[in-house]
């Protein structure tokens, strides 16, 4: 038995336009030279929205079974842990470089 | 809680009971074409690959003592005397999003059994992908030849910039190139009638790979070019 993606083509066109709009907003963050936390939070927001729509609609995941969703979103939690550890380590390396190599 | 039988093959109970019956099924877990499941598992592994590269880029950038080059400046282009930061990158982003759009349409046409339109949109997707790679190659050439960026140093700032840039965009570009070849191969097979009488799910499977490539670019664009 195969799963068929029988959705009206309209939904793909609407998401496509939405992705263009979100990409334009992402670009505007740089165009308007926003800085600091505002810049980073907007970059992350638009990135996550775009990624979310691509995964959910284009890759069809919204309509997939829960066991597949858990398979896809479970293991990447380990990646978040890695990111946390590596950012702590990076800050430490930066600090020790300042302590030992600065003139 | 019921164990699955062939008759209820495509139905799953909502929520955790459905997850339990999927995994407890006696014939196969995940009632899904094996090709599609394997593509998902491959994409899961590829997610880890790109995450490692982006995480190490983060680590190296945090710990670099020299200032990180401003990507807006490094990747700016001057068109008719107007200085436009990230112009080529914006165009590349739009091209890849468009290619995801054409791919979604190809999958839709494939499931309607419209072979002709499916092949057309697969080839269109491949052409967009090829143009993306061409633009990336142009970018690399400009950075290597004109700006003097090397994996071990550059005149603009932190020496690690080049290594992170070439590694991340190189792996991504390689995935796009492989995707273009894969798509053209699938288009040829669909067009030649190889899948006649069988399901055209291969188009959806190839589509998953292609959307993944676009997805990775969304992250690279945000973390490397904009941040």
Image (tube, coloured by chain):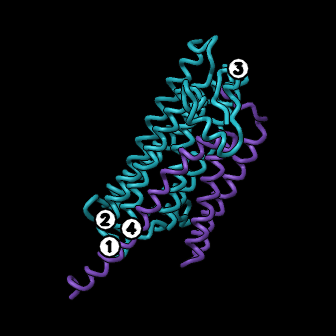
Chain colours: A purple, B cyan
Residue at figure coordinates x 67%, y 53% from the top left:
A20
Determine whether the residue tagged by mark 1 lies in a helix, strand or loop.
loop
Q: Residue B43 location in percent, x, y?
A: 48, 41
Q: Do labels 1 and 3 share a chain?
A: yes
Q: Is mark 3 on a helix, strand or loop?
A: loop
> Depth check: B104 or B180 in front?
B104
Q: How far apart are marks 1 and 3 (CA)?
A: 54 Å
Q: In the rendered image, which residue does mark 4 sit on?
A: A85
Q: In which quarter of the image is residue B201?
A: top right
- Asked if the residue under mark 1 is in contact with the one under mark 2, i.e. CB atoms within 8 Å, the reply is yes
Q: Where is residue A87 in the image (x, y as percent from the top left)?
A: 40, 70
- The percent coordinates of residue A46 (x first, y second) are 62, 62
**Considering only order in the chain, which callout, 3 or 2, is on the residue closer to the N terminus?**
3
Residue, disc 1: B64
Mark 3 burial class by Cα count in 10 Å: few <14, some 14-19, many 20+: some
Mark 2 and mark 1 lie on one chain; the one further toward the N terminus is 1
| Alpha carbons under labels 4 and 1: distance apart | 17 Å
B18 left or right of B136 in image: right
Residue on which the image places disc 2: B160
């Amino acid at each position: 038995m195969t799963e068929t993606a029988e959705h009206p083509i309209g939904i793909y066109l609407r998401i496509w336009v939405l992705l263009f709009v979100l990409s334009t907003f992402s670009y505007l963050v740089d165009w308007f030279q926003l800085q600091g936390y505002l810049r980073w939070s907007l970059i992350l927001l638009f990135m996550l929205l775009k990624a979310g729509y691509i995964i959910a609609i284009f890759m069809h995941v919204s309509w997939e079974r829960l066991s597949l969703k858990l398979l896809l979103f479970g293991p990447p939690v380990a990646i978040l842990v890695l990111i946390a550890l590596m950012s702590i380590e990076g800050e430490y390396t930066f600090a020790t470089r300042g302590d030992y190599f600065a003139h | 809680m019921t164990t699955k039988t062939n008759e209820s093959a495509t139905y799953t109970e909502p929520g955790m009971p459905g997850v339990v019956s999927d995994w407890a099924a006696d014939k196969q877990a995940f009632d899904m074409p094996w090709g599609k499941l394997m593509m998902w598992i491959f994409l899961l592994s590829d997610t880890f690959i790109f995450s490692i590269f982006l995480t190490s880029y983060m680590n190296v950038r945090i710990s670099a003592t020299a200032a990180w080059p401003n990507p807006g400046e490094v990747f700016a282009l001057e068109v008719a005397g107007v200085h436009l930061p990230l112009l080529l990158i914006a165009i590349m982003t739009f091209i890849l999003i468009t290619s995801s759009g054409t791919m979604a349409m190809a999958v839709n046409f494939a499931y309607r059994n419209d072979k002709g339109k499916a092949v057309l949109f697969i080839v269109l997707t491949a052409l967009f992908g090829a143009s993306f790679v061409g633009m990336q190659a142009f970018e690399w050439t400009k950075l290597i030849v004109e700006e003097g960026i090397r994996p071990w140093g550059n005149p603009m700032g932190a020496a690690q910039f080049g290594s992170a840039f070439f590694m991340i965009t190189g792996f991504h570009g390689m995935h796009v190139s492989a995707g273009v070849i894969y798509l053209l191969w699938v288009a040829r097979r669909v067009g030649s009638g190889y899948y006649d009488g069988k399901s055209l799910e291969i188009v959806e499977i190839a589509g998953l790979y292609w959307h993944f490539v676009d997805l990775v670019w969304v992250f690279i664009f945000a973390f490397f070019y904009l941040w």
